[in-house]
Image: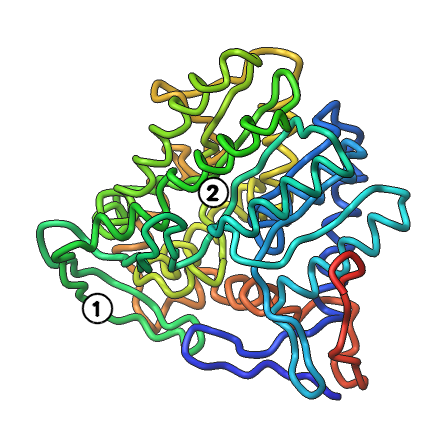
Amino acid sequence: MIIEPRMRGFICTTSHPKGCEQNVKNQIEYIQSKGAINGAKNVLVIGASTGFGLASRITSAFGSNAATIGVFFEKAPSEGKTASPGWYNSAAFENEAHKAGLYAKSINGDAFSNEVKQQTLDLIKADLGQVDLIIYSLASPVRMHPVTGILHRSVLKPIGGTFTNKTVDFHSGKVSEISIEPCTGDDIENTVAVMGGEDWAIWIDALKAQNLLAPGATTVAYSYIGPSLTEAVYRKGTIGRAKDHLESTAFAITDSLAAIDGKAFVSVNKALVTQASSAIPVIPLYISLLYRIMKEEGIHEGCIEQIQRLYQERLFTGNEVPVDEKGRIRIDDLEMRPDVQEKVAKLWMEAVTENLSEIGDLVGYRKDFYNLFGFDVDGVDYKADTNEVVNIKSIS
């Protein structure tokens, strides 16, 4: 079939297998171009199919020749219907890993569930024995609690008052004012239940209980802080409370792993175009201005560049991992440089529909957005008939 992007609001309902495959190959080539990383050899990535999770799996495999197990929850293809992009990404990753002689298996299912956790533990036990790096990179908006059976839904809302500021429709380029009403009721508790650290800790406890963690094992979860421009709706909003919980969980996990000299870290990463960030008011405008500045300064990074630098310059240097005053790894250091933020803040005040195409990087934003779904990827023939039914070898 000829596969074209179909938009519904801030979501693309189709994805292109060849585009996703090329994206994965491009990331692999980048990692290989940067040289070997003396990193972990048996790696579990929870949330492995897109974004930072996929970049972590690629960096582990092609930077450190690691065996990887990836857990994700993606929609498989059927005749006439494309899969979700994470499915195609994972299929391409496995193919490339196997070509390179690397172990790579995947599990598709709800990572919050006891069943998927046990399936993963059984696979580690059978094939790897133990893991020495666990990446936790889940980005689900809902979580069925495995004990209570309650379905929790996260919300992105300010706390204590209505938030009003600029935003942009990145499809049309229209800048407008938006107001977001404050959270109510159990919004904070539900958001923390989905996006906080409880599930991360459950995973680590389960691995530890079955002796599946190697001595000195490291686990890393990903977070975001961002600038004062977005803090009311992000870091000081409901999601910020969840991130606070995630970060405090890192200390609790480190304490629980003392006997094996294990450590847990939260890595604060850069703002990037993702399916989630595209739906957050204010963030697309901030990112389009940020991209413009960082590209002009020659310091722009995507997911793969961020994770390669995290591994090479923070996690696996042979020295103690550098952290900030709150114990967090800061790989958002280039984004948060004072000169960068000053320039973004100045452009923010000037941004209107009429000038955004000049002072921002909407073209780059849109390209990154379409790339998420395998579209607008250089070197792919989108007029060609493409087989939408692609299997993941270790699943099908």
In the rendered view, would you say 100 is above or below 82? above
Residue furthest left as drawn: 161
Pointer 1: residues within 10 angstroms few (<14), some, or many (20+)? few
In the rendered view, would you say 297 is above or below 25? above
Q: Tell me: 323 left or right of 232.
A: right
- Residue at 60 percent across and 29 percent down: it is 210
Write down the quadrant of residue 364 in the picture. Answer: bottom right
- Residue at 58 percent across and 39 percent down: it is 306
Please tell me whether mark 1 sits on a helix, a strand or a loop. strand
Question: Quadrant of the image for the C terminus?
Answer: bottom right
Q: Which disc is residue 35 wearing?
A: none
Q: Amino acid at mark 1?
A: Glu
- Residue at 52 percent across and 57 percent down: it is 110
Q: Tell me: 133 left or right of 140.
A: right
Q: Amino acid at mark 2?
A: Lys
Q: Tell me: 89 left or right of 340.
A: right
- Residue at 87 percent across and 49 percent down: it is 98
> Depth check: 65 or 174 in front?
65
- Name which of mark 1 and mark 2 comes first in the sequence: 1
Report which residue position mark 1 lands on: 177
Please tell me whether mark 2 sits on a helix, a strand or a loop. loop
In the rendered view, would you say 5 is above or below 175? below
Question: Quadrant of the image for the N terminus?
Answer: bottom right
Image location (x, y in percent) of residue 42: 72, 32
Image location (x, y in percent) of residue 27: 72, 50
> Depth check: 289 or 233 in front?
233
Report which residue position mark 2 lands on: 270
The label nearer to you, 1 versus 2, is 2
Q: How has the structure been colored for display? A: rainbow
